[in-house]
Amino acid sequence: MRRILAILALLAATPATLVSQSGPDVTRFQHFAVENPAGRTIVFHHVPDDSTVAAALAERTRGFVPAPVAGMEIPRDSFDVVVAPGEAAFTELTGGRVPDWGLAVAFSGTRRIVIRSPRLTGSTDADPAVVLRHELNHLYLAAAAGPGLSEIPRWFNEGFAALYAEEWRWVAPIRMAWARMTGGLTPLSELERTFPDLPAPETAYVQSLAAVRELHDRGGDAGIRALLERVRSGRTFDAAMRATYGMTLDQFYADWQETLGSEYGWLLALTDERALWIGMALLVIVFFAIRRYSVRREIARRKRAEDAALGDPDDHSLGVEEQERYWEWDEEEWKDDEDDGDDWHSGAPTRTL
């Protein structure tokens, strides 16, 4: 369960990622700036108790820019990263738009990221630096898309942020395979504007990551950069897909389904631990069925043997067992008669067959 929550915390960006927010005043926080020659200056805001945390986050994200954006001409505005010192501050800074398991959120309109202090999330498997890179990717994508940001599908936004935060390293493809085998995948076409309420929402985020990875496999960082430049120039996402990858968005969706079948099939699903337990359960069921069948056969065999020994119920002649018991009894009667000296012809017991 903790791993699932960590996946959600790392991958989930709420709809607030795509909207503006003036946000509460953070001037009461201490702050310092980190210059990034290849990207944008990042200003970290924190309380004294989080000085070490903020410095560590700044060091681990120093110079970070997602590869497709690094070569683009974008405005040099700075980003703000606010380390929320407590739950009340996190709720205030995000407007209460983030679920309880969310670790951070990006607001593209104000170019601000609010992240829970690692002091509050010590039990999670998520790496705070990876969480921050994920949210920085959202802001860099918004800056790269410019006025065309509304054209970017939600699945692409989430997948881009996850892929260039290098979260694919620990997101198991087996999850995709099992979701496909059990019908747990949502078509990408239904994830364009929002992520609906799903029984397993983390699967939609992993699916988005895999879809953007598929685009990366087709054209690399240069292909994704060209796609963003065309969206920024005013093209629709569908038109940008046609110009960049030679296919419409619907064609990509169809090809994606084929990719799922070839890369995320039964063979991959069977490498999961769950497959081992399911296989063992099936073996137990098969063994029980065979044993039950064998016991029934043995009972039937014994019943037939008894019926054969007793003979046909409609046949009133003595069966084999009755004959053996008769002769054993008759022989004993003869011996008794001889011992008593009785006259055989005068009153000995007689039998008629």
Image (cartoon, grey):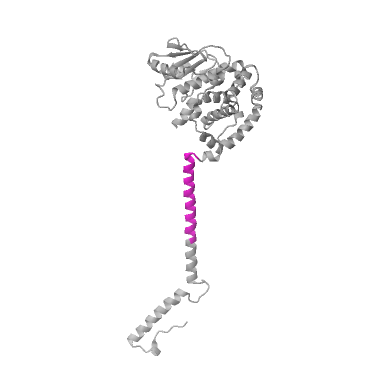
Above or below — where is 304 with respect to 275? below
Q: Residue at x 54, y 36 (%)?
A: 177
Estimate the x, y position of residue 127 in percent, counting from the top left: 44, 24
Nearer to the camera, 94 or 287 = 287
Above or below — where is 242 with respect to 300? above
Residue 16 in view of the camera: no
Estimate the x, y position of residue 250 in percent, counting from the top left: 65, 29
Q: Residue at x 63, y 19 (%)?
A: 230
Nearer to the camera, 309 or 231 = 231
Q: Quadrant of residue 185?
A: top right
Q: Residue at x 49, y 47 (%)?
A: 282
Residue 91 in view of the camera: yes
Q: Please say whether residue 7 is one of the residues in the magenta stretch.
A: no
Estimate the x, y position of residue 346 in percent, counting from the top left: 39, 90
Q: Is residue 30 left or right of residue 244?
A: left
Nearer to the camera, 33 or 149 = 33
Q: Please say whether residue 285 is one of the residues in the magenta stretch.
A: yes
**Magenta-drawn stretch, dominant element (helix, strand or loop):** helix
Estimate the x, y position of residue 269 in percent, counting from the top left: 52, 39
Looking at the figure, which quarter contains the N terminus? top left
Q: Is residue 19 left or right of residue 53?
A: right
Q: Is residue 50 left or right of residue 157?
A: left
Outermost residue to the top:
27
Instruction: Specify the segment rendered in magenta.
Output: 271-297
